[in-house]
Image (cartoon, grey):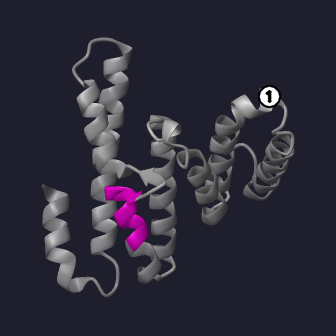
Amino acid sequence: AVVPASQAAAYLKKSVEVYQNLLAKADNPEVKNFEPSIRLKMANIYQELRQWEPAQEQIDWILSDPKRQNSLEAQVMAAEVLQAAGLDAAEKGDAEKANPLLREAAGGRKAPPIVIWGWGNIANKVARQGIDVPGDKGQQNRDTFFEARLKVVECLLARARLPGKEKDRPTRLDTAQA
């Protein structure tokens, strides 16, 4: 909010360049250890720039390793990118592109080797960890759970409002209300 949008975009692009230069040194063990974090930051920057494909590429790289597929932070970022890309496509009137993106944001994608949980599964997994646990962890789980449930509803509503989805609208609206 402090920096004008045109300047902010230039700063964000410069930060992507810096991260790409770091990744070019991936043979360095210190850089290699932080590569998932660097790519997560790049996905976030690409999302801010509304560049959905590069953002998804970074997420896909992170989640292509089964050891990293249980990273809540990466799964939340994946769902955020899918939802934002779907809403962007919906705003542009591209229902064919928006519908699968919003469906995956809500329900996930199970196309090995890349598994994306989606908001619904994020809520379920966090609930199993315990939303009634006392302390900071419980509060964090509660916040994530309710945010994820809200995002599921937002995705369902956005899908119901897509042009050409009139026949599915009552079912989607009923599901969102439940």
Asked whether 146 or 114 is in front, the reply is: 114
Question: Relative to 109, does residue 27 appear above or below in the rendering?
Answer: above
Q: In the figure, is residue 159 to the left or right of 8?
A: left
Residue located at (29% from left, 49% from top): 120
Question: What's the residue at 86%, 39% (across, down)?
Answer: 25
Give percent across and percent down for residue 105. 39, 58
Dividing the picture into quadrants, the one containing residue 158 is bottom left
Residue drawn at (38%, 15%) of the image: 136
- Start and end of the magenta stretch? 100-110
Q: Residue at x 12, y 55 (%)?
A: 178
Q: Nearer the viewer, residue 58 or 168?
A: 58
Nearer to me, 17 or 69: 69
How packed mark 1 is, by other alpha carbons closer than 10 Å (few <14, some 14-19, many 20 or more), is few
- Residue, disc 1: 29
**64 drawn magenta:** no
In the picture, measured across the screen, residue 32 lies left or right of residue 63, that is right
Q: Residue furthest top?
A: 135
Relative to 151, say whether 173 is above or below: below
Q: Position of residue 23 (x, y in %)?
A: 80, 43
Indicate the quadrant containing the N terminus: top left, top right, bottom left or bottom right: top right
Q: Position of residue 94 (x, y in %)?
A: 47, 82
Secondary structure under the numbered disc 1 in the rendered image: helix
What amino acid is labelled 1 in the image? Pro
The spot of residue 60 in percent (x, y) is 57, 54
Magenta segment's dominant SS is helix
